[in-house]
Amino acid sequence: MKEFLQDKIFQLISEAADEQQQECYVIGGFVRDIFLKRPSKDIDVVVVGSGIELAQRVAEKLGKRANLSIFKNFGTAQVKLKDLEVEFVGARKESYQRESRNPIVEDGTLEDDQNRRDFTINALALCLNKDRFGELVDPFGGVEDLKNFVIRTPLNPDITFSDDPLRMMRGIRFSAQLGFFLETNTFEAIARNKERIEIISKERIADELNKIMMSRKPSVGFILLEKTGLLELIFPEVLALKGAETKDGVGHKDNFYHTLAVLDGLCEHTDNLWLRWSALLHDIGKPRTKRYDPRLGWTFHNHNFVGEKMIPEIFRRMKLPTNEKMKYVQKMVTLHMRPIVLSEEEVTDSAIRRLLFDAGDDIDDLMKLCEADITSKNPDKVKRFKSNFQLVRKKLKEIEEKDRVRNFQPPISGQEIMDTFNLPACSTVGEIKMRIKDAILDGIIPNEYEAAKTYMLEIASEFNLTIS
Ligand code: ATP
Ligand code: MG
C-alpha cells in the first residue's frame, strides 16, 4: 500500500512518529477513499499516545509552510499544508451512556480505536512507522466489504447505532453517496433503533440529508430512510406522499416514488442543492389537497400554493436555512406547474411574458425542474410533452430578447405618477402602476418609457384624474 502514501507529508509524519517512538496510522475516510479512487484532502492520523505532541513535531519539521492548530479540550491538533488538512488524534476507547452521543473517552490502543468506528470500510488503518510503512490493518474485513459494496458495522450493530444514532444516518448517506448496500443485520438494526435518532441534533441530521441530496441518486437514500422507518421520524411530510388510493377503479400515482424519480432525473442536470430540494418538495402539498371527485377523478387543487406555505415550517423544524435559499425553494414550488400548463395550451406571448416576470433570473432552474417533472410511463405522452416544452423554451428566448421582461422594472415610477397627477402616496398610484405592468405583460404596449407614459395618460380618465 506504500504507493498510496507518496505525498511527502506521510514521510514527514513517519519520521516524526519514529523520533517520538509513537505508533501511528492514517485511518478512516482517507484510507477508504484510496480504495474507492476518490481523491481526498482530509487526512486523519491516529497515534497511540498524544496526537498533539506528534502534530507539534510535524509542524516543527514543516516550519513556516505549515499552520498548526491545537484543540486541547478534544486532545486533537490539526496541521494545514496548502490544501491538505491533517488531523492528529490519540487512539481512544469510548464508552457511551444512554442519554448522550458524547462518550466517555479514555486512552486506548489501535484496536480500541478501530472498534469505535462506524463501519468496517471506515475502520481501515495504514501504518506510517518506518518498519511497517504502508501496512494495512483491517480487523473487520473492510476491504472485502469495499469489494462487495457493503456497509456493515464492525461490532454488534444494535450497540453501534444505539451508542451514536447519527451513524444510522451516516450509513444511509454512504449507501447513497457510494452506491453501496446496507448489509441485512445492519439494516435491521437501524430499523430497530430508529427511535434513538431523537438524541441527535437537527443540524447534524440536516447535514446528512444534504449529503444524501448531493449524491448522484438521492432516491437510494430516501428509500432506505423510508424502509428503516427513519423517514417517518425525521421527515413525515415526505413519507405522507407515499401510497396510491383507488376509488371507482380510478387510481392516482404514488407521489413518493414520483417525487424521487423527479429528484433523480433533475440531479443529472444540476448540482444546485436548493434546486434539488425544490424537486423533493415540489409536490409536498399534495397529501393535504387530495380530493376525489366522481366526475374529475383525483385532484390536488392548489397543491403548489399549499406546498409553498408548508416550507417555512419544515425548514425551521429541520434547521435548514430560512433565508433567501428557502425563498428560492418556495418560489420553485409555487411555480413548478406553470411551464407545463403552458406547454399543454396554445403558448401565448402574454403567458410567456408573465412566466418570465414571475420567475425572473430563476427561469432556467424552473424549466429544469419542470422538465424533470415529466415522468409519465406513457412514452407518447412524454414525447409530446417534451416537444411542447421545446416550444416553450424557444418562445421564452424570443420574448426575452424582444421584451426583456425578466427582472422587469416598471418604466414609470410611483413618484412620476404622483407628480403627473399631483397625487399623494395612495392606492391609486399602485393601481395605475399595476395597469401599466399588466399592459406590458399582456403585450398591449411595449416595455418602453414613452409607450408607458402615453398609456398612463390614456387611462387617467378612468381614475378621474387630470394632469396637474
Ligand atoms: P466524509 O468526510 O465524506 O463525511 P468520512 O468517513 O471521512 O466521510 P468524517 O466525518 O470525515 O467521515 O470522519 C472520519 C472518520 O471518523 C470516519 O471514516 C470514521 O472512521 C470516523 N467517524 C466519523 N464519524 C463517526 C461516528 N459518528 N461514529 C463512528 N466513527 C465515526
Ligand atoms: Mg472525511
Image (tube, rainbow, N blue to C red):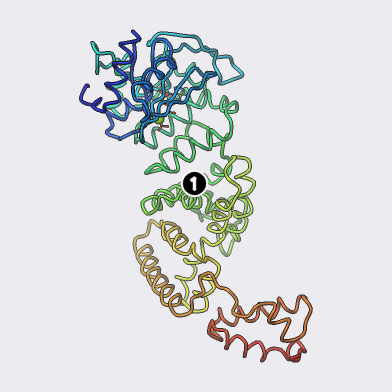
Give, as a three-letter code, the residue at label 1: Phe
Q: Residue at x 40, y 68 (%)?
A: 389
The answer to whether one can see residue 329 in this image is: yes
Q: Is residue 77 above or below residue 317?
A: above
In this view, which residue lies farthest toward the front? 64
The answer to whether one can see residue 290 in this image is: no
Q: Quadrant of the C terminus?
A: bottom right
Q: Quadrant of residue 154?
A: top left
Q: Quadrant of residue 387?
A: bottom left
Q: Which residue is mark 1?
A: 256
Q: Residue at x 37, y 44 (%)?
A: 216
Q: Secondary structure at mark 1?
A: helix
Say whether residue 393 is left or right of residue 448: left
Q: Residue at x 58, y 44 (%)?
A: 237
Q: Of residues 307 and 463, which is closer to you in this image?
A: 463
Say whether residue 157 is left or right of residue 412: left
From the top left corner, tell me how far across and down residue 316 is, in percent.
Answer: 63, 43
From the top left corner, tell me how far across and down residue 11 is, in percent.
Answer: 27, 21
Q: Quadrant of the N terminus?
A: top left
Q: Of residues 355 and 110, which is closer to you in this image?
A: 110
Q: Is residue 133 above or below residue 327?
A: above
Say whether residue 221 is left or right of residue 128: right
From the top left corner, tell me how far across and down residue 412 is, in percent.
Answer: 63, 80
Say whether residue 466 is left or right of residue 367: right
From the top left corner, tell me how far across and down residue 454 is, in percent.
Answer: 62, 90
Q: Of residues 101 and 468, which is closer to you in this image?
A: 468
Displayed-image quarter of ligand 2: top left
The 10 Å Cα crowd at callout 1, few under 14, some 14 to 19, many 20 or more, is many
The CB of the residue at mark 1 lies under 8 Å from ligand 1: no
Q: Quadrant of residue 89?
A: top left
Q: Of residues 79 and 220, which is closer to you in this image?
A: 79
